[in-house]
């Protein structure tokens, strides 16, 4: 009898989502309140996600049903907008170097009224920790989305020895296990099928929903993207983006 099949993945993924709902909803709401405050002050919410966690950033930034002042901060920018070569970008150590975090921030217009989300399953790599530390140096509110199980069992790769969850103002645990993968089979020496991508989508859109609710309660009309595949969307979206010219990718 196989122990790897889609039905089992659905079952395990549901367990993670159920845990998110029962354990992390208060932190999601607390984080959303901080982010709504920033947006109401004409701030931008910058979202850094290295590796596969960049999916969290692009889940929120520049997409239908998401808000315009969400800015994706990606390591890809070091090559696309900076002076790093594509070959350097592809190196597995890129995320681990603290200086790459600082160099990445230099490519973005970050202002005092802004806020930051960092999504990193492990929360231990140098660029992640350095960006988190720089957020605190600048007194920017910092939300972490991470696996507390994985991070608490791992040693930081930053010279200062700290991990993301030890720096952030609010931590949202993605409730995924150490190593991320959630299925196992005795014929394979490691677990398979990552869970954090599923968890992160639910966290991202839950934050989006709560921020929107809070802004509407204040009488603030949220600047929300219309799908670019809907007639008239280009004109509407560009008009909304104009307010944040140069501040969002």
Image: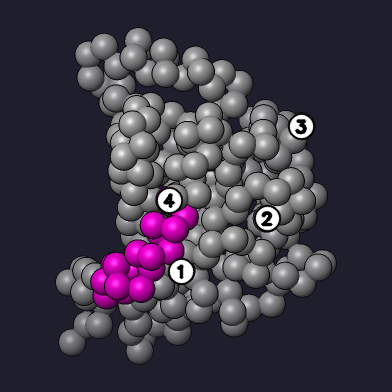
First reached walking from the N terminus: tag 1 or tag 4: 4
Give percent across and percent down for residue 193: 36, 69
CA–CA distance in space, label 2 to label 4: 18 Å
Name the front one of labels 1 and 4.
Answer: 4
Vertical placement of 25 versus 241: above or below? below
Name the front one of labels 2 and 3.
Answer: 2
CA–CA distance in space, label 1 to label 2: 16 Å
Report helix, strand or loop for mark 1.
strand
Residue that appears at 50% across and 49% down: 34
In this rendering, would 15 be left or right of 188?
left
> Which disc number belongs to residue 173?
1
| Residue indicated by mark 4 | 32
- Look at the numbered discs 3 and 1 and tell me whether their residues touch, using CB distance below 8 Å: no
CA–CA distance in space, label 3 to label 4: 34 Å
First to last magenta residue range = 15-32
Name the front one of labels 3 and 1.
Answer: 1
Q: Residues within 10 Å of mark 3 (few under 14, many from 20)?
A: few
First reached walking from the N terminus: tag 1 or tag 2: 2
CA–CA distance in space, label 3 to label 1: 34 Å
> In the rendered image, which quarter contains the C terminus?
top right
> Which disc number belongs to residue 83?
3
First reached walking from the N terminus: tag 3 or tag 1: 3
């Amino acid at each position: 009898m196989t122990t790897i099949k889609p039905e089992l993945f659905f079952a395990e993924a549901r367990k993670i989502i159920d845990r998110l709902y029962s354990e992390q909803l208060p932190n999601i709401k607390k984080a959303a309140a901080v982010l709504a405050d920033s947006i109401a002050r004409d701030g931008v919410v910058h979202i850094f996600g290295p590796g596969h966690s960049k999916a969290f950033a692009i889940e929120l930034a520049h997409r239908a049903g998401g808000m315009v002042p969400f800015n994706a901060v990606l390591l890809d920018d070091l090559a696309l907008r900076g002076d790093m070569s594509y070959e350097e970008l592809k190196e597995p150590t890129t995320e681990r170097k603290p200086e790459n975090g600082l160099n990445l921030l230099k490519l973005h217009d970050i202002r005092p009224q802004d806020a930051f989300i960092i999504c990193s399953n492990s929360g231990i790599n140098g660029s992640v920790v350095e960006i988190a530390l720089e957020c605190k140096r600048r007194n920017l509110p910092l939300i972490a989305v991470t696996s507390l199980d994985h991070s608490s069992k791992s040693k930081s790769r930053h010279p200062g020895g700290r991990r993301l969850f030890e720096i952030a103002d609010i931590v949202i645990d993605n409730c995924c296990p150490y190593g991320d993968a959630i299925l196992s089979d005795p014929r394979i020496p490691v677990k398979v099928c990552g869970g954090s991508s599923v968890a992160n989508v639910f966290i991202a859109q839950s934050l989006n929903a709560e921020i929107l609710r809070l802004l509407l309660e204040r009488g603030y009309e949220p600047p929300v993207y219309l799908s670019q595949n809907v007639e008239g969307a280009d004109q509407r979206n560009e008009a909304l983006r104009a307010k944040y010219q140069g501040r969002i990718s």
